[in-house]
Image: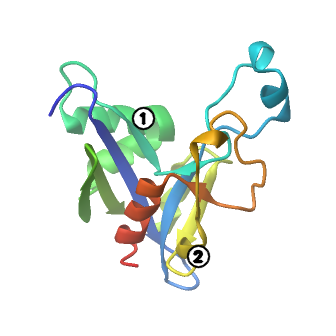
Amino acid sequence: MLKGEMVAILLMTRHPVTQNLVAVLSRRGGFNPETVTNPEKYGCESFPGLCQLTAAGRIENRETPEQALLREIDEELGSDMCRHLSRVASIDKLIETDGRHIMVTEIEWKYLGLLPHGHFVLVDEENVIEIAKTDPDSKRIGFPDMKKIVMFKDEREVVMKALDV
């Protein structure tokens, strides 16, 4: 594994009422109209409002894929979720695509409470086909309609594989 390769985790869980398997997606920074009209003043998150895998990042110098994944989970999902996953997670599926190593693991619904609040979206097999694909022109403008789920094509395909769609 080379430095710069990507690792990611896609958390899955069973909805407590329907028992449908759902994927837990992370929504990139909130959409802020001020950053679109004045990025020099406010900075600019690329693709604000875009949904992506639960946590992802690049492997840094001297890291194993496992170390990189735990670091990314800690940074993006918090230390409580990192500790929980390091104790109980098993790889239910490993999806490799375009230099990315994506671990898919199922957790109990009650452990979603360990996630930071506010920027996660649940998707099941019924609504995964409604996910829109992004285009490069949206990098700075983003996706202001938070009712709509937009993903990069390759990540959308990973979610579809994980849900066996």
Q: Amino acid at mark 1?
A: Asp
- At x 60%, y 72%, the residue is 130
Which residue is denoted by mark 1 in the rendering?
74
Q: Nearer the viewer, residue 140 or 72?
A: 140
Judging from the image, what secondary structure is the residue with disc 1 in?
A: helix
- Marks 2 and 1: which is nearer the front? 2
Which residue is denoted by mark 2 in the rendering?
127
Name the image quarter holding the N terminus: top left
Give the answer, above or below, for where 155 lies relative to 109.
above
- At x 47%, y 50%, the residue is 54
Q: Position of residue 131 (x, y in %)?
A: 58, 66
Residue 107, visible in the rendered structure: no
Number of marks in the image?
2
Q: Position of residue 134 (x, y in %)?
A: 58, 52
Q: Position of residue 57 (x, y in %)?
A: 38, 35
Name the image quarter holding the C terminus: bottom left
